[in-house]
Image (spheres, grey):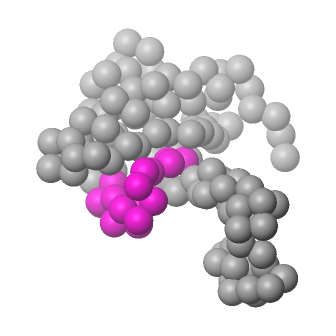
Amino acid sequence: MEEESQRQKKIGSVLQRDLVDVLQRAATQGGMQGILISVSKVKVTVDLSFAKVYLSIFPNNKAKELIEGIKSNAPLIKHELAQRTKHQLRRMPKLEFFIDDSLEYIDQIDKSLKGEENPIKNPSFLDKRKKS
């Protein structure tokens, strides 16, 4: 896989900074108090037409519901971002949203190492990690 160009990285960081603001405000205005949304990574394709946005959502049990809402409002989010970045970006990439569960995965490993959740004694912990 190719290394990201400086341009891709720059566009990714511009999008990341503004997306946090847009998403957090939308969640608050939508009546979802106590939800924390962070944009952990934005990867922009070489042709700058797509941006994969990885979100960490806390509390975790709201993540699935929230990501569906975000995906269905992607055109509105894209428009809001375009307004904010019109002086920095000529074209707004199409946004694709994904849940970044790396923190949850790290937490699971941490619990396993501390002996709180032992996958050898309870193999059901391994099933939680198997994702398509």
Q: Nearer the viewer, residue 8 or 31?
A: 31
Q: Nearer the viewer, residue 50 or 100?
A: 100
**Residue 98 placement (x, y as % from top left):** 52, 56
Q: On the rendered structure, is 65 left or right of 43?
A: left
Q: On the rendered structure, is 58 left or right of 40?
A: left
Q: Nearer the viewer, residue 41 or 46?
A: 41
User: Picture quarter containing residue 41?
Assistant: top right
Residue shown at the point (50%, 48%) measured from the top left:
56
Q: On the rendered structure, is 48 left or right of 18?
A: right
Q: On the rendered structure, is 113 left or right of 70?
A: right
Residue shown at the point (81%, 60%) measured from the top left:
113
In the rendered image, residue 71 lying in the magenta stretch gets the answer: yes
**Residue 38 placement (x, y as % from top left):** 46, 39
For the image, the number of numbered tags is: 0
Residue 61 seen in this snapshot: yes
In the rendered image, residue 104 lying in the magenta stretch gets the answer: no
Residue shown at the point (44%, 15%) measured from the top left:
88
Image quadrant where one finds the C terminus = bottom right
**Residue 68 placement (x, y as % from top left):** 35, 64
- 1, above or below 101, in the image: above
Q: Which residues are magenta?
A: 54-72
Residue shown at the point (29%, 60%) measured from the top left:
69
Residue 50 seen in this snapshot: no
User: Picture quarter containing residue 76?
Assistant: top left
- 48, above or below 58, in the image: above
